[in-house]
Image (cartoon, helix red, strand yellow):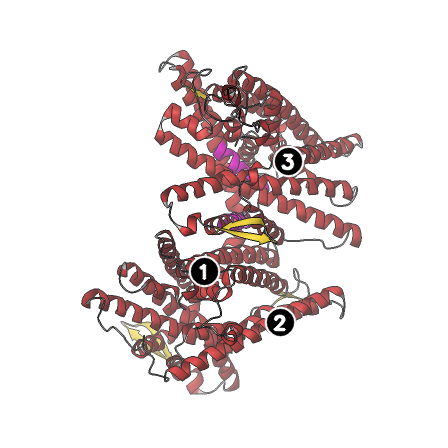
Amino acid sequence: MRGTEDVVDYKFSDGDEDQLFDDDGNPKRTGTIWTASAHIITAIIGSGVLSLAWGTAQLGWAGGLVTLVTFSFITYYTSNLLADCYRFPDSVTGKRNHSYMEEVRANLGRVNCIACGIVQYANLSGMVIGYTITASISMVAVHKSNCFHSKGHSASCKFSNNPYMIGLGTFEIFLSQIPNFHKLTYLSTVAAIMSFGYSSIGIGLALARIISGKGGRTTLTGVEVGIDVTVADKVWRTCRALGDIAFTYSFSAVLVEIQDTLKSEPPENKVMKKANAISVFTTTTFYMLCGTLGYAAFGNDAPGNMLTGFGFYEPFWLVDLANIFIVIHLAGAYQIFTQPVFLLIESSAQKKWPNSIFVNSEYPIKIGNKTVLSLNLLRLTARTMFVVLATTLAMAIPFFNDFLSLLGSIGFWPLTVYFPVEMHIAQRKIKRRSMKWCMLQLLNFLCLLVSLAAAAGSIQGVSQGLRTIWSASAHIITSIIGSGVLSLAWGTAQLGWLGGLVTLITFSCIAFYTSNLLADCYRSPDPVTGKRNHSYMEEYANLSGMVIGYTITASISMVAVHKSNCFHRKGHSASCKFSNNPYMIGLGVFEIFLSQIPNLHNLTILSAIAAVMSFGYSSIGIGLAIATIISGKGGKTTLTGVEVGIDVTVADKDTLKSEPPENQAMKKANGISLFTVTAFYMMCGILGYAAFGNDAPGNMLTGFGFYEPFWLVDVANIFIVVHLVGAYQVFTQPVYLFYETWAREKWPNSTFVNKEYPINISNKTVLSFNLLRLTGRTIFVVIATVLAMAMPFFNDFLALLGAIGFWPLTVYFPVQMHISQRKIKRSSVKWCVLQLINFFCLLVSLAAAAGSIQGVGETLRKSKPFQYKV
């Protein structure tokens, strides 16, 4: 990543070209020891500095200081080995290597280069996740600080990190569309000022605390084993502390790019070694100040993020300023660290598919006659998906210290120790089993052990934190991702790139917000200590409608398998049209038998099977869409979707555990689930639209035809059927239980309602029949199947279900319950905003209902009920 400030923009003239270019044909480099030192310090000092007080507390005065000094010496030594490998084969006159991977390829070969690339880019991606976690913690800290300041120290000021992570992710999606953002040199300067700023505030506040006599209790060996800390806890914490300190020295990945900015006289390796010495000495001094003063201020109770330990009271403005510095630093640093990942993906795609419109075409956005930004479909989708995935992972594991430790353990040994040592051995041709070779390998081995111990400790910490929220996230994801995902390409085609993306993000944000309101209403009147409410009292019409939709979708998939095999067997010109009705009837008969099993929804294996199936068929659809796009067969797309013309009129377009508290754990699960699902939805919608253009089909899988690869489309459709067979029962069980419970309460002595008739095999009851269950559930399945046969119109029916269910269940009731529980005053600002959301979502639901009803009516005019064929 060559800094543009170190490359001179020369004008060409005859006779002085040797003075304008370096030996590799690039413009003369002008970097010096001071510019290199500044770049290194900027790369080193980051958010990890705030965890050093906690790390020192786990290791104590002796262990903390020794570990910091040891890591600094190892880093300085291996950085110098890396500096000598910049040129190959000779460290002064050899050929330049412009990146870390090039250096590894030149010295160690292609296989090591690939391994280095995997570790380097995984580490860079991990840094982004760490930055997302840290930035959200700082934003929450500012919110809490101002809450306490305005409402008093006894106020309840607890906030979720998830909205801030989502906000940062959305901001970074927009920033990531700017090509070569890392070349904006002011970012490095801003980052350096911000990092020194918040670190200095932390040091100053720690000094003030120590001088005031409020310092915590410290020991030579750190946190002591006792009532609250077991021996195992001490071991794990020590390992994580090693990882935290390793993270603060994980900057080797950018050293080669920094060295590539240096001018050739004196030799680059000598200048770089001096810059390494200045930088490592400066940062180690800064680290020791943060670690030791933070430990002296807080003692063995030092927090994971030093700034949070100063509380949220006074001086609140100074802590706020430090946290704002962190957010500004990380918002820019996020892009600097992601650009190498983006460029790797995009340059690889451009080389592999040089003629692909999806990969190479640019779509300029103009204001007046001036192009202000250029959009590229690959850049739009790939960078958006990367940011979404990074944000989702950050929300899934928002554990500051454990994640920093994991990053440090992953990146430190291979990038800081292993590759520099092995390249030095190869370049200097050090003999195997010689004294120097043995010492270098011993260093290698010891650092590997430290990295493994740190990784083990951090993984244990992350897994411990995940136990509370992971199961809830899995259930939510399973219930959300369903067959509707296959219609998203069609929906995006109607709205276009702009409308499709904005609509998906808007709906996900609204759903996330109202789900959190619902989580707070699980207990009443208080969201933490109140009485539990065990059910929502669902809109049973919506659940029944879902079952009809599932019947339609499953039959379409079964017909698709039949058609695919018909074409494969009889040829592409064969007449392969089949009615959905036999498949709906077959599914209905099968569901009647399944429905006689009481409480099928309690079988947890169903959730796992449904999740696997839904991810399976969606992934196949995404893969086939990518293959269509890359092959150059993608359809015509527009910013606003399907265009008004011969086939589309203006009217057509217009109708288109208790610890932590359950509400906190559920909010995290909501964030993880909705962000994961939105990412998946965006992939299906965007890639499906890019593949089919404005002619995207209602069910994405049917758009790939029924020819080849017929077996893959068949597998996807079978996945859908398996998923929906089980999901059908999961969604009908609340309906069955509702009217059966009502009947038992109404007629407690009725034999028809209450008597069970067991079916025994070898004196063992395998199933129990009940006349109400037999008749009631059979009638329900029959009615659902008949309605599905009467209107088997996939997209319009899904839209109608969404319109019916979205506003009341997702928005209206959560908002009204929140207003009631929190006693929000009528006509207050918050009350007005909530009612505005309510009204807006009602309008959207009414518009969607009108469009879907019009669609159903139009389809009914063209075909007769019960006689629909595909």
Residue occupied by mark 2: 812
Q: Is residue 40 above or below residue 756?
A: above
Q: Quadrant of the C terminus?
A: bottom left
Q: Can you give x and y, in whole percent of width and height, for residue 618 in the image?
A: 40, 59
For marks 2 and 3, give the one nearer the viewer: 3
Residue occupied by mark 1: 637
Residue occupied by mark 3: 186
Mark carried by residue 527: none
Q: Secondary structure at mark 1?
A: loop
Q: Residues within 10 Å of mark 3 (few under 14, many from 20)?
A: few
Tag 3: amino acid: Tyr
Q: Which residues are magenta?
A: 384-411
**Mark 1 near mark 3, Cβ–Cβ under 8 Å?**
no
Q: Residues within 10 Å of mark 1 (few under 14, many from 20)?
A: many
Q: How many marks?
A: 3
Q: Is residue 118 magenta?
A: no
C-alpha distance separating marks 2 and 3 = 47 Å
Tag 2: amino acid: Tyr
Q: Depth check: give the residue in front, 29 or 17.
A: 17
C-alpha distance separating marks 1 and 2 = 35 Å
Which of the marked residues, 1 or 3, is nearer the chain's N terminus? 3
Q: Is residue 395 magenta?
A: yes
Q: Residue at x 41, y 27 (%)?
A: 104
Q: Secondary structure at mark 3?
A: helix
Tag 1: amino acid: Thr
Q: Is residue 46 above or below residue 760?
A: above
Q: Is residue 772 above or below residue 79?
A: below
